[in-house]
Image (cartoon, helix red, strand yellow):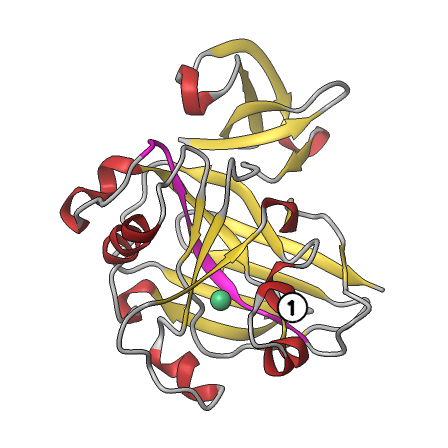
Amino acid sequence: MRIARFVIDSDPQYGLVEGDEIAAIAGDPFFQGVQPTGTRHPLDEVRLLAPIIPRSKVVCFGRTYADHAKELGNEVPAAPLMFLKPNTAVVGPGDPVTLPAFSEEVSYEAELAVVIGRICKDVPAEKASDVVFGYTIANDLTARDAQRTDGQWARAKGWDGSCPLGPWIETELDVDDVTISGRLDGEQVQSGSTAQLIWSVADLVAYASQAFTLLPGDVILTGTPAGVGLVREGQRFEAEIEGIGTLSNTFRR
Ligand code: MN
């Protein structure tokens, strides 16, 4: 299933994306299951929103792909490296991102995002799939200049708009080997596969759950493959993941 959140002429609601249509569903699928209301809309007549506003946090992993760690001159960490983004960082598919005034060096990072479906803590990797609701796409936008100068990455990684998510949550996806690509103004700049992750997606969910209680609707970003670079005002970045779709955002000052 592909679960999206959308507006057409009233309040945001959830829906099931089926081909070029969206079937509205009643209530909140994280807590009430998927119950279609019978109302359908052409997909191009609705505005998609971020498929989830994380209930409490976005847990992010850095340097989980060796080729990306190396391209920025970093060692591959001995254990997974985590940081957080606040839920106010999240914007939706198609939303314009306002580049922060404090940075001249904002970089794109196309990433597979895990959406948690159940409250959990200390999840063994072999049970990680039990707590996963589905997968979506993220752009871990990063102010590289602030990342270099600040001891903590809260500002560099957590500014408003720094976490585009979408276009929807795919609930059935085998994430062992899916391609992740990034295009800047139509030109391919990132290309990798989750098969290149140093730790598996299940290992990352397990690791995050050792530090944090994960809540339904929390999101985990699994890191970016090589090819990161800067985005400038007026440009468009598209992150595409095989089996999910494409997350596209433009940038402005
Ligand atoms: Mn990242």
Image vertical order of residue 39 relative to residue 53, above or below: above
Image quarter of residue 248: bottom right
Extreme residue in the left direction: 126
Residue at left offset 58%, top offset 52% = 247
Residue at left offset 49%, top offset 86% = 72
Extreme residue in the front direction: 151
Pointer 1 local density, CA inside 10 Å: few below 14, some 14–19, many at least 20: few
Image vertical order of residue 102 relative to residue 70, above or below: above
Position of 104 compared to 13: left or right? right
Amino acid at the residue labelled 1 = Gly
Q: For residue 186: magenta? A: no
- The kind of secondary structure the magenta stretch mainly shows is strand
Q: Quadrant of the N terminus?
A: top left
Residue at left offset 46%, top offset 35% = 217
Q: For residue 113: magenta? A: yes
- Tag 1's secondary structure? loop
Q: Position of residue 228 (x, y in %)?
A: 55, 77
Q: Nearer the viewer, residue 161 or 42?
A: 161
- Residue range in magenta is 106-119
Q: Position of residue 91 (x, y in %)?
A: 66, 47
Image quarter of residue 79: bottom left
Give the residue pinned by disc 1: 186
Image vertical order of residue 3 relative to residue 36, above or below: below
Position of 41 compared to 203: left or right? right
Q: Nearer the viewer, residue 129 or 102?
A: 102
Q: Position of residue 138 (x, y in %)?
A: 52, 54
Q: Quadrant of the C terminus?
A: bottom right
